[in-house]
């Protein structure tokens, strides 16, 4: 029986119908010059076949390139021609009428984007969208519910998600990255590498990326949606602590005196020790890093099996619930990830770069990650 890892991989290696290797960001094949697009439901980059209607496409598959009978039609996301350069497709059918302003599911999550009349905002927004498409493609592949707060047709006005990408205009009122009631605010300045790197240094963080911010904030959203008021709250409190303790006070203490000296024995990051909600967000983000990393490695046939490392692997004793179906598969996933990242860190060192994976996972974090794994597995639609 396939485990949840092999059943729901986020594939990252794709092929054009001509056989050429293509990637998540590609919108044309460099070998055969066919148009390409990302089809969110299939979670795949596909080759496109032009129909008799301008801007309408079908998916080309080997041998069926010209057979349009009954084939689903698509149009490109309206953000294809914007700075976002979105290569995602949007299906056209009775329930999804097309039009020039139709966005794909990833772009439909945007509520506010940086002012595009300011030229320097083009590149900031573009980088944010590249990271966001990577995030959303993974959420969809994992089967997590992805609905939008404000825009049809994937709208859920009660429980949907929306992004505000904002820039600070007045330093007295700086934009703060965060999540509230389904709205994720991202300080667009974080897409400026020099700014983000300076912040990383100032906060003594080993890792700070746009994708990391998005995965962290979406964790708060899914906590509200999947954990609050559900039976998961009990194991959550057991592992992460009681989230009812004063949040504002906890963050204030964290920024005033820093993390406890022994945080590394219990958390994936220093910030995770500030409050159970932040621990959840850091742990969830970490789980998405690990899953994407492992799925990408597997997509390219890079397996941990042949790697020789001297570290002792984790055993079932490190888990939150070693009796659950799939516990061994989860444990193998963690140990394989640790083996692969050991090699990747050495490879980074051989290029004179910082560690690719600047984390040490304590057993307590392995247990918390298992709960995240189980919550995601149980939430999978279909
Ligand atoms: Zn091709
Ligand atoms: Zn789009
Ligand atoms: Zn947070």
Image: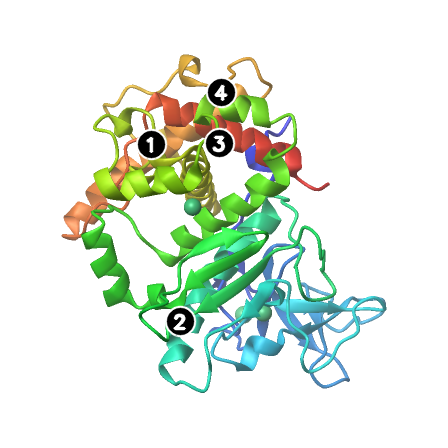
- CA–CA distance in space, label 1 to label 3: 29 Å
Residue in the picture at 24% in, 54% down: 200
Point out residue 83 in the picture as x, y percentages from the top left corner.
47, 79
Q: CA distance from mark 4 to mark 2?
A: 38 Å
Vertically, is 266 above or below 177? above
Instruction: Of the two numbered discs 1 and 4 on the same chain, state the one appearing first in sequence.
Output: 4
Which of the two residues, 109 or 290, is positioned nearer the viewer here? 109
Residue nearest the observer in this picture, 13 or 143 = 143
Are the residues tagged 4 and 3 within 8 Å (C-beta)? Answer: no
Which of the 4 image quadrants contains residue 191? Answer: bottom left
Q: Which mark is residue 243?
A: 3
Q: Look at the numbered disc 1 and say if its residue's Cβ is closer than 8 Å to ligand 3.
A: no
* Residue at image mark 2: 167
Q: Position of residue 380 (x, y in %)?
A: 66, 39
Relative height, residue 305 to residue 97 (above, below): above
Element class at badge 3 = loop
Q: Which residue is denoted by mark 1 in the rendering?
A: 338
Residue at x 74%, y 64% (from the top left corner): 153
Of labels 1 and 2, the one closer to you: 2
Specify which label sits upstream in the sequence, 4 or 3: 4
Q: Secondary structure at mark 2?
A: loop
Q: Judge whether residue 13 can be spotted in this image.
A: no
335 with respect to 229 (left or right): left
Instruction: Kindly tell me whether residue 43 is visible in this rendering.
Output: yes
CB of mark 2 near ligand 3 (< 8 Å): no
At label 2, counting other C-alpha atoms closer than 10 Å, the crowd grade (few under 14, some 14-19, many 20 or more) is some
Q: Position of residue 348 (x, y in %)?
A: 21, 48
Residue at the image position 16 percent from the left and 46 percent from the top: 349
- Circles 1, 4 touching at the beta carbon (< 8 Å): no
* Residue topped by disc 4: 238
Relative to residue 173, is residue 22 drawn left or right?
right
């Amino acid at each position: 029986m396939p485990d949840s890892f092999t059943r729901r991989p986020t594939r990252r290696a794709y092929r054009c119908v001509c056989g050429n290797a293509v990637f998540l960001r590609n919108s044309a094949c460099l070998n055969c010059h066919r148009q390409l697009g990302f089809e969110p439901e299939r979670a795949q980059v596909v080759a496109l076949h032009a129909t008799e209607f301008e801007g309408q496409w079908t998916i080309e598959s080997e041998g069926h390139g010209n057979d349009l009978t009954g084939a689903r039609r698509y149009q490109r996301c309206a953000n294809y021609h914007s700075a976002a350069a979105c290569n995602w497709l949007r299906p056209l059918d009775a329930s999804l009428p097309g039009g020039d302003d139709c966005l794909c599911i990833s772009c439909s999550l945007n509520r506010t984007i940086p002012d595009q009349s300011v030229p320097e905002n083009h590149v900031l927004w573009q980088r944010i969208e590249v990271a966001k498409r990577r995030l959303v493609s993974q959420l969809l592949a994992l089967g997590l519910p992805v609905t939008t707060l404000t825009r049809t047709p994937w709208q859920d006005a009660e429980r949907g998600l929306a992004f505000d990408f904002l820039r600070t205009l007045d330093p007295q009122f700086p934009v703060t990255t965060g999540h509230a009631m389904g709205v994720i605010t991202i300080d667009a300045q974080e897409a400026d590498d020099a700014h983000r790197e300076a912040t990383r240094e100032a906060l003594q963080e080993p890792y700070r990326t746009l994708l990391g911010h998005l995965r962290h904030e979406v964790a708060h959203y899914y906590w509200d949606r999947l954990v609050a008021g559900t039976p998961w709250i009990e194991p959550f409190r057991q592992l992460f602590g009681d989230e009812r303790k004063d949040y504002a006070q906890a963050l204030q203490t964290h920024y005033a005196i820093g993390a406890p000296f022994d945080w590394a024995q219990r958390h994936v990051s220093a910030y995770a020790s500030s409050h159970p909600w932040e621990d959840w967000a850091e742990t969830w983000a970490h789980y998405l890093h690990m899953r994407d990393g492992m799925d990408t490695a597997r997509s390219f046939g890079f397996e941990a099996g042949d790697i020789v490392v001297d570290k002792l692997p984790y055993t079932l004793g490190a888990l939150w619930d070693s009796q659950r179906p799939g516990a061994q598969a989860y444990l193998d996933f963690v140990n394989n990830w640790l083996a692969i990242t050991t090699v990747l860190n050495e490879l980074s060192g051989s290029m004179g770069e910082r560690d690719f994976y600047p984390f040490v996972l304590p057993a307590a974090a392995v247990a918390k990650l298992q709960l995240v794994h189980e919550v995601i597995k149980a939430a999978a639609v279909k």
